[in-house]
Image (cartoon, helix red, strand yellow):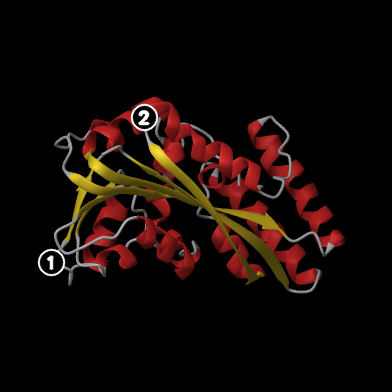
Amino acid sequence: MPMMKGLEWTFDTAAAAYEKFRPGYPDDLYQTLFDYSALQLSSRAVEVGIGGGQATLPILKTGCALTAVEYGENFSELCRKKFEEYANFSIITGKFEDISFPPSQYDLVYSASAFHWIPEEIGYLKVYAMLKNGGVFARFANHPYRDQGNPALSAEIDRLYSKYYSAYYGREIRSEPEYTEEEAVQRAQIAAKYGFVEIRHAMFYRTRVFSAKEYVGLLGTYSDHIAIEETIRAEFFAKIEEAIDQHGGVLALYDTIDLQLARKPL
């Protein structure tokens, strides 16, 4: 789904739904990260934009001290309760850009499907300053692609987007193409502009299948959908749910997950 700047506030209004419907990340992704950055009990890590905590538990289980940063108060409270049994977990509510961190103190700074909200130069320079020499920055995200194997359903959903979404925002929305490895490489190389070295990337894939009700629940976690006026949004979602039920009852998403890794020089 496309992201629109200035809608960061919308996520916190759907914290419970976000935790329920947004997916976690594959085990292979974390293994790739841990092979690149071996976390120990003495390690210190920061997660930028914890959201519903979809990318938190594997890091916590290493035993390292993990500080999460989250702009939304509802998400902060949700994750505070969710991970309360972990003494190595803490959370700060606020914008990453506005929070002061001591320089050269962290072994890992990572962000899952959240770093795109931060202006590039501010984000990368801040992460670089926070990391110890040899410390690692990991950035990863999920890129869902709607199943094109049911052309009648796809055409009807596109029509509904034109009628409701495009009419509301005054602009046409184009179907997002599948995320490519070329895009992942380009994203990985951003880190080189800010002094990082040993830049790597990896790709992971999966398929998720949703009932009609589950799919509209997922749509209700996207910023630009949340921001649509409530009565319009309710009718829009009801029509999408109806369309899925009339065209087989399920909709598949093909996920591409990209991981970028970079190291602060020793």
Q: How many marks?
A: 2
- The label on residue 119 is none
Which residue is under mark 1? 87
Q: Is residue 31 left or right of residue 48?
A: right
Q: Is residue 81 left or right of residue 150?
A: left
Q: Percent from the top left, x then y, of residue 206? A: 61, 67
Does residue 251 appear in the picture of this structure? yes
Regarding mark 1 in the picture, which secondary structure is present there?
A: loop
Q: Percent from the top left, x then y, of residue 57? A: 31, 67
Q: Percent from the top left, x then y, of residue 85? A: 17, 72
What residue do we see at 29% from left, 60% from top? Answer: 38
What residue do we see at 64% from left, 33% from top? Answer: 169
Q: Is residue 162 left or right of residue 193?
A: right
Q: CA distance from mark 2 to mark 1?
A: 34 Å
Which residue is under mark 2? 195
Q: Amino acid at mark 1?
A: Ala
138 or 210: nearer the eye?
Answer: 138
Image quarter in which the C terminus is found: top left
Q: Percent from the top left, x then y, of residue 80? A: 22, 61
